[in-house]
Structure formats: C-alpha cells, structure tokens
Amino acid sequence: MPVVWIPALLRPLTGGQARVQAAGATVQAVIVSLEAQYPGLQARLITDGQLRPELAVVVDGQTSPLKLRQPLTDASEVHFVIAMSGGAGP
Amino acid sequence: MTTADKPTEFKVLGSTPLRQDGVDKVTGRAQYGADIRLPGMLYGAVLRSPHAHARIKAIDTRAAEAYPGVRAVVTAQDLPELESKVADLGEGSMNLRYQSNNILARDKVLYFGHAVAAVAAVNAHAAEAAAALIQVEYEVLPPVLDVRQAMRPDAPILLAELRTDELGQKGEQPTNVAAHYLDEAGDLEQGFREADVVVEREFTTAMVHQGYIEPQNATALVTADGQVTIWCSTQGAFGVREQTAEILRLPVSKIRVIPMEIGGGFGGKIGVYLEPLAVLLSRKSGHRPVKLTMSRRDVLAATGPTSGSYIKVKMGANRAGQITAAQATLIYEAGAYPGSPVGSAMGVIFAPYRIPNARVEGYDVVVNKPRTAAYRAPGGTNAAFASETVVDELAEKLGLDPLAFRLQNGVQEGDRRVNGVAYKRIGLLEVLRAAQSSAHYQTPLAGPNRGRGVAAGYWGNYGGKSSASASVNADGTVSLQEGSVDIGGSRTALAMQLAETLGLPIEAVRAAVADTDAVGETEGTYGSRTTFATGWAVYEVGQQLKTQLCERAARLWNVAAEQVQYAAGVFTSGEQRLTFAELAAQLDRLGGPVVASAAVQPKTWGPGFAAHIVDVEVDPETGKVQVLRYTAVQDAGKAVYPNYVASQMQGGAAQGIGWALNEEYVYDAQGRLLNANWLDYRMLVTLDLPMLETVIVEVPNPGHPFGVRGVGEVPIVPPAAAVANALYRAVGVRMAELPMAPGRLVAALQARQG
Amino acid sequence: MSAMTHVQTTLNGEAVEFLCEPRQSLLEVLRETLGLTGAKEGCNNGNCGACNVLIDGALVNACLVLAVEVQGRTLTTIEGIAPPGGLHPLQRQFLEHAALQCGFCTPGFIVAAKALLDRTPRPSELEVRQWLAGNLCRCTGYDRIVRAVLAAAEEAQT
Ligand code: FES
Ligand code: FES
C-alpha cells in the first residue's frame, strides 16, 4: 500500500501519526481511503473537487502536475506539501 | 568546471556562441515595451494613494475629464467585481479579487502608492496634469507596518473578511494573519537534549525591491470588434493573457499578448499592474491605443517588493559535529494582500542539512505596504540569512571549519527534508568540496578588520508548462519559435539545445520568442525553468524533426524509415548519404514542409545548491563595508550556455550583496515611503563590487534529457549570510538585521564595546 | 500646452531640426519625437545612466537635459556609435564578454564607456569602475561589463 506522509497541521486528525498507509491506485483514491480511516482529512486536502491550491502533491520525491489523478504503485510515497512559489522545491 | 557522474559529450551545449539578440541589444535597436509607438496612440497616467490605509468615500473625476486632451478616465467602477478565486500564477498563487483591487483600489487603499484611477490623454504631460485633478475623499485609517504589530489582537485590520487559514481550517476572528504553516519531523525536544551546543537567535530583514532597470509598461489596443492586443514588458505573456482575461472577464481568445524585450524582472514582472488599465482606457477612449509607463517612484512604491521578515532560529549540534535539532519561526510581510513567499522560505531554511528533529513554522501576514511579488528565490535570502548565520556560529562553537561542518551535515540523495520529501540526485556535497578547493578559499586572508565568510543556499527550481515549434528551411537552417520571454540569453540557450538535438552547428538554428497567438502555452520565465522546461520542449521538437526527416530520406531512397540513420548532421542508409542541408533542399519534392511542435509539463526538475565565499573589510569608524573578493560556487546541472550561467551567478550574488548591505524600504510612521528613488534606495554600483568569481559544478539532473537544472535563483540565497559571517570574522559582531548598513554596524560595534 | 520651440542640432552626424516644448527633456524628445529609442528611461532623475548620450562629446543623462539646450550642439546616441556596416569595439566586446543579460542598461553603459575611452584610451579597472559608477545594471553584477570595457580599450590599441 502507498505510504502517505501527513502534513504536520493535519496530524491531530491521525492521532499524531506522521505516516500512514492507505490503499489506492491514484492520489484521489488514497485520499478517499484516508478519509475512511481518519474522518475530516479529505476536506483539508481537497476543495471544490481539486487539491487545495496552496498544496502540491509529491509522489516519490517529484511534484506531480497531475495532482489528484497521479497514478500510484504499492511502493509509492505520497507527500502533501506547501506549494512553493517559483519552485522552492517539494 | 567540475563534473560529477558520467560526463556526456556535447558539441553545442557548453560552448559560448554570441547571443542571437545581441547585436540589437548593443546597438539600441531592440524594442522594449516603452519603445512602442502606434498611430493615434494615447498616453496614460495613474493616480495613486498618498495614504497607507484609508477608506475611499468618493472619487470625483469631472475636472480630469474636462481637462484638454483627455480621452478617458477610469476607476475601480470600470472593473468587473470579482469573486474570491485563487489562480495559480507561477511564482505564487493569487486571489483574483485581490489582484483586481490591487490594480485599482475599490473601497479601501491599503498602501502608499495604491492605484486609484487612471487617465488617457494625447500626451503624457496632459495625462499627468489631469490625474492630479481627480478628487478623492479619504477617511484615513491607522496603518500597520510591522508583522509583529499586525499579529496583535488589537491591530488595525486591513481586510475585513480575512481569516487565518491552516490547511483548509479557517480561524474565527478577523485578522491580519492570512495563513499559518507548519512542518515537523522527529522529536524536537529529544534532539535538543542530544545537543552539546545550542544557538538561538532572532533576525529581522527589511522589505527590498527587485530593482529591474526597466519600469513596468503596457500598451493596449481594443478594436471595435472587442479584440484586444497588449504589448508589454512581462516575464510571461501567457500569464498576462490569463490574468487580464480573468480580471476583465474576457474570453482568452479575445486577447493577444505580444511580449516586448524585457529590461529585467527577477519575479517582479509576473503579476499584471498596468495591462488591464491600458485595456480599459483603450476601450473607453474610442479604440485608440493607450500606452502606460510607470515612473521609478511608482515602480518602487507600488510594484514588486519582497517581504521584510522576522525570523527566529534555534539549532543544536553534538560534539561530534552532527546537527541534532533545528527550529525556526518565520513571519513574512505579504504586503497589502495575502501571498508572501513564507512557504518557500520554510522550504529553504534548513534545506542543505540532514536534521533528524525539526520544526518549522510560518506566518503570512498582511501589512500596509505594497503587495509583495516574487523576487528571485522568493523568501530564500531572508531565511538563509538567519539559518546560515546560526550554522556558522555552531561551527565556530564546535571549533570546526565552516565548510567542513556543512559537508559533514550536508544532504545527498535519499536524505529527507523537514517536510519528509527525500532528495533525488543533488550536488550539494560536490559544491561544498569545490568551494573548499577553490582558489579563493585556498588563499589566506590577512589584515585588520578583514574577514571571510561562507554560506550555503538551496533552491528547488521549477518545471511547468512549455511549448515550442520549429520548421526546417530549404537551405538547411531551422527556425525555432518558443514561448519563453528572453531576459538573459535564453533564446540562444534554447537554440543551442535544438542544435545539439539535431546535430547541427548553432549557426543553423535561429530562435524567436513567439506571442500568445503564435506558440503553445508556456509559463513565464521564472522559477529557473526556461532552459530546463522550454529546453525540454525544444528537445522534443528536435526529436520529431529527426523522425520526419528520416521518413523523407527513406522516401527518397525507397527504403523503410527504420533503415535510415541520422547522426552528426548526416542521414545514411547503406551506401546512401545526405547531409541535413542536402535533404532540406529536397523537401518540396518529398512531401512539403517539415514542421514540428511539442508541449511538455515535466515533473523531474532538479534542485540546485550553491556555496558562496566572501572577503570583506570593515571601516570601524564609519561602518562602511568593502567587498574584497567574492566567489560563487553552484551546481547548474549541465551548464548549457556557460557564460550566461556564470552571469546569473554573478548577478544573483550582486543583488544579494546589495540586500545585505544597503537596500531597504524606509517608511514613516504614517506609512509613507520615504525613499522611492534610486538615490535613497541605493543599489550597488561598479565601485561597490570586485570582480565576481564563479565555479560552475555540473552534477547532471537525471530528470532532463541534457541534465539541466535551473540556475537563476540559487545565487541570491547565500550572499546575505555569507556577508554577515564575514563581518563577524572581521570585527566580531553577529549582525541580526538586514541591511547591515553602516549605521547599524557602527551601533553594533559600539554596543559590543560598551 | 505651451508654445513650441524650434531646435537645430547635429544628431549622429546628421543635421536635425525638431519642435519641442520648453519643459520637454532631451530624453523625451529623442524617444518620442525623433524615434530614437535606444536611450532608455530607467529613473528620469539622473540616477541610472540608462539614458546616457553625448553632447559635444560630454557624457550626460538625457533625462536631466532640456531639449531646448541642444540648440547648435552635436549629439551622439547609442544609434550613432557603430561605424557604418559594423560594430564599435565596445559593442563587440560587450557581446564577446556576455556583458548583458536583459540589455536594458547596455546602451547607457556603451555610451558612457565610449566617453571614457575617448579621453582615457587605456583606463585601469579602477578608472573604469569610477567612470561607470553612474550607470546601474541589476542583472550582471558589473564584472563582465568592466571586463568588456577593458577589452575594448585593448582592442582599440591594437
Ligand atoms: S533615466 Fe536618466 S539617469 Fe535614469
Ligand atoms: S543587463 Fe539588465 S540591467 Fe544590465
């Protein structure tokens, strides 16, 4: 299962856990299964059906332009990070 | 130059042809935005607020409208009222309603210089005289100019609807804190318990400007069928098109943006200021072209600047020289509307180091100063000034060489950032080693009041969308159309990448910057992305051209396309042989023109690291600092156009040294900007600097066909810290405030003595 | 609008006449009336040198000169620096040394450097830096500009 790193501000929703496993073949699907485990998480990551504009999704060390539609493998590592101006990097 | 990993042999990349736009630029022929003159053109002027914070009660434009030669007057009433909507505009997202209100204030002015109305007239003098006749009735409100004041519960509120955002959770109370961010890793308290040495310091930095020499300008023509053409100085024509369409609620297809040559941007020419005004004025004046240019005063008062900041850093290390814990709080001025680069700054502050236990917190705070814009590695200089000063002090306390301490703790592939993301192949360690072995670092510095400082810096760089197209000419040359505005030689760097791909000499490829109707969507020249991402699009174009040309050769020789090889400018199949030019001459008889276009949106951009070394001499009487020697070392990935890579490193260093020593916005208690000119806002001149040495390190980015990383932004990150560390070595004081201007340095020296 | 003044001058080797208002700067008239946009406006108050031109061989900021003042004088702008069909050594060396990024400051630097080389054919680095201290470049950090001027001086000698 992909490993999701939970942003520090959202760790109260995961009981303080910084890393959790969540099933899903895309970032979107992973967020849906996260929501089932930790209610409230989805609304903090997604707004109007899109990833929050202030966030970027980083999969295996690379910021994905596909965002929610980014395909994942079982070994994927997913980060939600603050979107940087001009690419301060993931 | 040092190269790591497997070196690749290139013919064109790494060479130094003359730039293709060079002759135009040394003969005065190049057309910048303000150089345009169209038949029947009107000239605009903008009325700006004399107050830092005030409610607009009424605007009376009648006298201006009656002034001889005036053809149109506009206020915010002429702009559509927009919903709050956040648009992603490259270097930082923007809320479109705020963006519109920044172009013309609607109910409140939020900073000295905020635009209130605009006039178009038959000449610039008439427009200015008429603008001065516009009567604005203000209810003056108390301004808030400092981030920590702005965070107090009793502070005057700038934006009544603003609530603090914490990743989607909104605060309850009106506030000036637009957002709160947090990154955490490991166990901070445990980390500090493991430390033998802990350093904790507070820093403040002043608001500074990008300082591009060409003021903002825009000319617009709206024809009777509503078609809009804009000529302007911008880092990204497509961004101007998108913002103007959103702000004026126009279909994108109605707007064509023609980017003129641009006289510097550094992040400050991404957001629009004048373009929508020029469109409104052209429409209202009966479809005449209208040109608006800013004065230097307007540029300083109302565009650009990057955030002043308050930063607190605490770091600990053990006796073995390992950093065990690091903590930072960063509070950044957003200016009048949310959107400081504090998020980027959080990503920069501890980026060069392996830190098992860390906590980094950021606040984006509105104050009555101009809305900030991106400035070269936005937020990075402030952050590195703080952290790299503390790192220097840790090394000193541990008795370690500052570069050796950085090497010991430096990140490499697989190490994790505070936000948990692991680095791919990066070149920090190679950069630090190159700095250690540089001629500069190997040469001892002697003499009273002299000191040497070093600092490291990081920038993530950026990818983004880019497009290009090219056609093969009958004489074997290739014409390239690309969507990136050329601010410092990028046309040539892109032509070089196409020439390399095609196995042609650079002379065979000519690049042109295309307007928004002539090439696919391309993000602006920012984020150190042009040579990387547009270069990638150009590479794809080259691959397609090769494929098509092989098919044409196959047709000529009656063989299957797979049987045609192409290398070093020659097509072969068995005994058959044809040069690129020979085949190009026959295209008309083999199926017609060969044209290719490509668009990319790569995600594999690569971070860059730098280390800077500076020697200074201080006059303890006056506090004057002379830079004696400076060396910038940087991993560029593959350096495509090395002269211009080095020039970026030099230019970034010079801006950073100016930021370190001289530059700052000075406001009075009422929030009026006191130094909106270049005599009082002092940028470095020739006499302030020595030659600037550069060492280009090439650790290829595995995520680019040619190994390119970005170059432009990293070099402004280390200078302020490097200078501060040098000052400490020279005269024994740790400066905690930017700029480290003579008065502040003398005060610090006196405080130490007594 | 005030009455126009008639001005006769020699501009880049040719006799030129124009009408201007007394309040108009030379920079405004060059750019707006005469269509010579090589001199740039960076500040309009004498602080950047982007508008540098030569009046009777002397270096001035065109934004600080009134157009009426050039009556009977000889003007050289960036457009008049190159010999016919070629480039001036300064222009060539600016290209060779990659002494420009955006190029907006370049006309001013080249005109200013020409004024220097006209009176001091072999300047030292310090003399170049002192002479060019009135010109701002935000892109390059000056290193390449100073080298280009020194190289142009050398080229002119050989
Ligand atoms: S425009 Fe004349 S000196 Fe700046
Ligand atoms: S090259 Fe841009 S200001 Fe000098």
Image (spheres, rainbow, N blue to C red):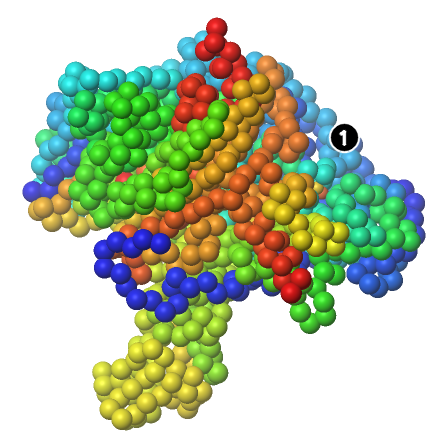
* Crowd rating for badge 1 (residues with CA inside 10 Å; few <14, some 14–19, many 20+): some
Q: Quadrant of residue B64?
A: top right
Q: Quadrant of the N terminus of chain B?
A: bottom left
Outermost top residue? B754
**Percent x, y of residue B642:** 42, 56
Question: Residue at point 31% right, 61% down?
Answer: B706
Of residues B591 and B695, which is closer to you in this image? B695
Q: Is residue B309 left or right of residue C84?
A: left
Q: What residue is shown at x 42% (from left), y 47% (from top)?
A: B694
The image quadrant of residue B216 is: top right
Instruction: Chain letter for mark 1, please.
Output: B
* Residue A21 point in image, percent of width and height: 9, 36
Q: Nearer the viewer, residue B487 or B17?
A: B17
Q: Amino acid at mark 1?
A: Leu
Residue C65 percent location from the top left of the image: 81, 43
**Residue drawn at the location 37% of the way across and 33% of the way down:** B454
The foreground one among B96 and B23 is B23
Query: Would you name the residue on which mark 1 appears?
Result: B133
Vertical placement of residue B37 versus B111, above or below:
below
Position in image of residue A26 (x %, y %): 16, 47
Q: Which of A6/B105 is in front?
A: A6
Q: How many marks?
A: 1
For the question of whether residue B380 can be seen, the reply is no
Residue at left 42%, top 11%?
B152
Q: Going by the image, does B170 lie left or right of B447? A: left
B716 to B133, vertically: above or below: below
Q: Secondary structure at mark 1?
A: loop
- Can residue B742 be spotted in the picture? yes
